[in-house]
Amino acid sequence: PDPEESMTTADMIRHWGYTVETHEAITDDGYILSLLRIPHGRRTRGFISPCRRSPILFIHGLSTHAAEFVINPPESSPGMILAEAGFDVFLLSHRGTRYSQRHLNLTKDDPAFWKFTFDDFAKYDVPSAIDRVLKLNGASSLFYIGHSQGTLIGFLMLAEKPEYNSKVRALFQLAPIGTLKWGRGLSRF
């Protein structure tokens, strides 16, 4: 069996020889989000302080979590490739995912815990993650990489919270979502 099958995302990163830090971002509505940091690559360890590296924040797609950016071997995992390229890499798992099922006042068994939408990801999760990344790194702006649902959240956040436009140096969108117009079944509604 594959040893990575039962590993956490942080364990997978360590498995490949990378340093990983576990942080939290607390949203204004009380969710406690998992935020992993790969401060440097295996070959770039110690050359440049993580606080002098440009930060990159990865936001995952629907029905997944931060592991999607580090699940492959290092040469084909975007998170590790960019850590090797000299970036300070951060991986967010937004509310409700496997690694972000905590809240300041609610338990995951409380139905109120699960009453959230894409809008809440954009209004609360991404801004709290951006603020935490910038505080940890010391930079005034970061690079945003969204995949699928992560692209929609990025678009929404920048449109609804224009004060974050100066905090996002560039927005990179992988498999962007702009509309559900062509969806079938429940996704159409």
Image (cartoon, helix red, strand yellow):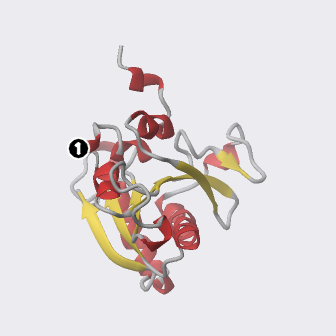
Left or right, 110 with reference to 58: right
Between residues 75 and 49, which one lies in front from this camera angle? 49
Vertical relation: 168 (above or below) 144: below
| Residue 64 is at least partly visible in this image | no
Q: Quadrant of the N terminus?
A: top left
What residue occupies the far top of the structure in this picture? 1
Identify the residue at image location x=40%, y=39%: 17
Which residue bears the numbered disc 1?
A: 75
Between residues 115 and 8, which one lies in front from this camera angle? 8
Identify the residue at image location x=56%, y=46%: 96
Vertical relation: 20 (above or below) 44: above
Left or right, 178 with reference to 67: left
Q: Position of residue 153 (x, y in %)?
A: 41, 64
Left or right, 16 with reference to 36: left
Between residues 160 and 7, which one lies in front from this camera angle? 7
How many marks the image carries: the answer is 1
Instruction: Sort mark 1 into few (<14), some (14-19) or many (20+) by Cα contacts within 10 Å.
Output: few
Vertical relation: 177 (above or below) 43: below
Left or right, 119 with reference to 150: right
Q: Quadrant of residue 75?
A: top left
Q: Amino acid at mark 1?
A: Glu
Q: Position of residue 68 (x, y in %)?
A: 35, 43
Q: Position of residue 152 (x, y in %)?
A: 36, 64
Query: The residue tagged with tag 1: helix, strand or loop?
Result: helix
Identify the residue at image location x=50%, y=34%: 8
